[in-house]
Amino acid sequence: MFEIKKKELLAEKTYLMVVKAPNVARSCEPGQFLIVRAYEESERIALTICDYDRKEETVTIVFQTIGESSFKISELEEGESFCDVVGPLGNPAEYVNEPIEEVKKRHYLLVAGGLGTAPVYPQAKWLKEHGVDVDVIIGTKSKDTLIMEQEMYDAVGEDHVFVTTDDGSYKRHGMVTAVIEDLVKNEGRKYDKCVSIGPMIMMKFCVKLTKELGIPTIVSMNPIMVDGTGMCGACRVIVGDEVKFACVDGPEFDGFLVDFDSAMKRMKLYQTEEGRRMLAYTEGKCKGHDKG
């Protein structure tokens, strides 16, 4: 039913798949995600939507092979099908539901780190298609790990995409924060809103800088999602003085209010069985119970 129309190896352990999923393609928006299962006995995996084609009734996902479930997905070939594709889930990017004339008044800066380039792409594409000024920074470890560079050029134009690598093997050398500083302080670019998606540590330091620069910043907490329904409790995050769950309340939040340190600690604990038991013991049964 959910046939794989295209499969491509983008980089080592990083795959792109275009999947036939009419219901998802019909109603999804930038910022949302879906849940997939390779086989009936497989674990559910939450994946952000990289692209969608309403006419072809397809959605595009990009993922890395990290654990058993993602390896099972990577073994599927074109012409084969997923057991389940459920979505769209989560809330769209905030600008999707705002008056477009107000959105057009802003200059957006989108900051992508590593695999975060995939969920940044539909946001860049949507904004450009709606006549909104947008610049994109792509940060990655090296040239070998860079993904979707040409797609991003096609979406917003080469003059609006800035690639940087940690090891200096391609384009600029350094972290995304160095590029932000250069664009704002040296090139005099002014941004009304920033959207940052990538590793938690990258988003943390991106927000630290944009706060100093006075650029309101949205972050996507999709890296801490596990089952995508709020039942596992893995994506519990402190936003301001409230407890939120990335999969049902997000995945996007005001970056200035996110407690990154507690979220990263929680994510590390959740990777072990002992850590999951400890979290369950100290916090009860998660979503649907007392959030406090």
Image (cartoon, helix red, strand yellow):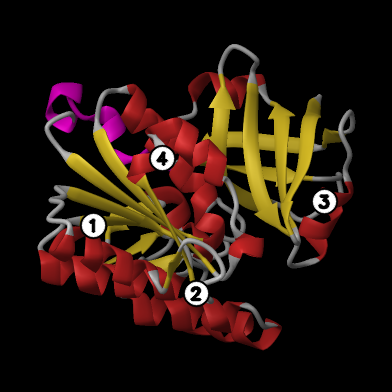
Q: Which amino acid type is marked by label 4? A: Glu
- Between the C-alphas of marks 4 and 1, the distance is 23 Å
- Between the C-alphas of marks 2 and 1, the distance is 23 Å
Q: Relative to 287, is 280 above or below?
A: below
Identify the residue position indicated by label 1 in the image: 217
- Which residue occupies the extreme top position in the image? 55
Which stretch is magenta? 89-103
Q: Which label's residue is closer to the chain start, 2 or 1?
A: 2
- Residue at position x 76%, y 56% from top? 43
Residue 30: give x, y in percent of width and height: 43, 36
Identify the residue position indicated by label 2 in the image: 166
- Residue at position x 35%, y 23% from top? 129
Identify the residue position indicated by label 3 in the image: 74
Q: Residues within 10 Å of mark 4 (few under 14, many from 20)?
A: some
Is residue 98 shown in magenta? yes
Q: Relative to 206, is 32 above or below?
A: above
